[in-house]
Image (cartoon, grey):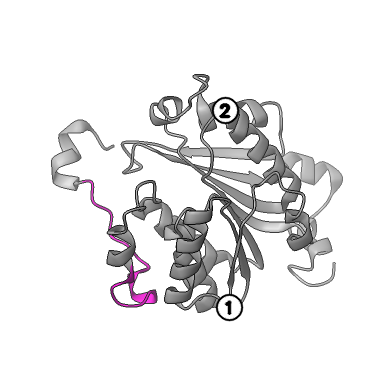
């Protein structure tokens, strides 16, 4: 088990796994940009990149794209897959212009569509026409806004889809909430409470090498082996309707 005695030997720097999939110099350019503050952590981008490569999703929504540090990495993974689309929401004019510029420089525009919209904008549904496989939420950190974005994500997310939330660390989440009531972390805990179809995992320091933390939420009801046996339904048949394993 990792303890404080291991911190110096282990270190806190995370190696990016996606660098070779981005144009030379782009990472450094984005990191040095005057508006870079608030960018997603390397560990977060590693996770997003790996999940997309492993899951090969068809449709992804990013709520709070900022200047695109996560967007270009997710776009690079989609480009590597040769499949799927990412919709990036960024309502602020100055961030949106920078986002578009970096998406073009990264060469991922074929798979990434920046949208100058708030998550509450009804026009979003003109672009999202089917349930989403993955959603990355890194937007307004106040409790009320986070709760609204989580509710929206629940409505848009497909069964068995995954929601990734940034800034849910036990200390940082509360500090980032101007409403002083727990921020994104508490909003997620309250929303998922009593929902047996939402499975929540918090990745936190010291195992997660960033104080902001991250949460993974899968939208799936866990069926016990006993319940399956009582219904005499083989495990693989639970997926038959989706065609994952062919016809039942």
Q: Which residue is rendered at x = 38% and y = 74% of the image?
A: 22
CA gap, disc 1 and disc 2? 34 Å
**Disc 1 marks which residue?**
110
Where, by quadrant of the figure, is residue 116 drawn? bottom right
**Looking at the image, is 21 positioned above or below residue 186?**
below
- Looking at this view, name the residue that lies furthest to the front: 93
- Comparing 116 with 145, the one in front is 116
Q: Which stretch is magenta?
A: 12-26
Q: Is residue 185 left or right of residue 194?
A: left
Q: Mark 2: few, some, or many residues within 10 Å (few <14, many ≥20)?
A: many
Tell me which numbered mark, 1 or 2, is placed earlier along the sequence: 1
How would you classify the magenta stretch by its main secondary structure?
loop
Q: Nearer the viewer, residue 205 or 126?
A: 126
User: At 46% from the left edge and 69% from the top edge, which residue is drawn?
Assistant: 101
Looking at the rendered structure, the secondary structure element under dot 1 is loop
Q: Position of residue 35 (x, y in %)?
A: 36, 52
- How packed mark 1 is, by other alpha carbons closer than 10 Å (few <14, some 14-19, many 20 or more), is some
- Give residue 143's mark: 2
Q: Quadrant of the C terminus?
A: bottom right
Q: Secondary structure at mark 2?
A: helix
Q: Residue at position x 75%, y 57% from top? A: 131
Of 134 and 242, nearer the camera is 134
Say whether residue 239 is left or right of residue 33: right
Is 159 inside the magenta-drawn segment? Answer: no
């Amino acid at each position: 088990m990792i303890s404080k005695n291991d911190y110096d030997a282990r270190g806190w720097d995370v190696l990016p796994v996606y660098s070779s999939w981005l144009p030379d110099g782009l990472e450094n350019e984005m990191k040095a940009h005057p508006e870079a503050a608030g960018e997603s952590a390397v560990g977060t981008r590693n996770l997003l990149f790996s999940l997309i490569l492993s899951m090969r999703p068809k449709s992804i929504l990013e709520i709070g794209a900022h200047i695109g540090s996560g967007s270009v990495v997710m776009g690079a993974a989609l480009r590597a897959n040769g499949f799927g689309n990412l919709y990036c929401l960024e309502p602020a004019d100055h961030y949106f212009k920078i986002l578009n510029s970096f998406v073009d420089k990264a060469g991922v525009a074929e798979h990434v569509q920046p949208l100058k919209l708030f998550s509450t904008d009804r026009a979003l549904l003109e672009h999202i026409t089917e349930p989403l496989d993955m959603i990355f939420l890194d937007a307004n950190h106040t409790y009320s806004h986070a709760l609204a974005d989580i509710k929206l994500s629940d409505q848009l997310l497909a069964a068995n889809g995954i929601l990734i939330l940034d800034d849910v660390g036990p200390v940082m989440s509360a500090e980032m909430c101007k409403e002083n009531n727990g921020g994104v972390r508490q909003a997620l805990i309250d929303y998922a409470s009593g929902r047996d179809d939402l499975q929540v995992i918090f990745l936190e320091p010291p195992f997660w090498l960033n104080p902001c933390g991250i949460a993974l939420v899968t939208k799936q009801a866990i069926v016990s082996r006993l319940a399956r046996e009582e219904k005499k339904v083989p495990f693989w048949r639970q997926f038959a309707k989706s065609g994952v394993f062919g016809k039942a």
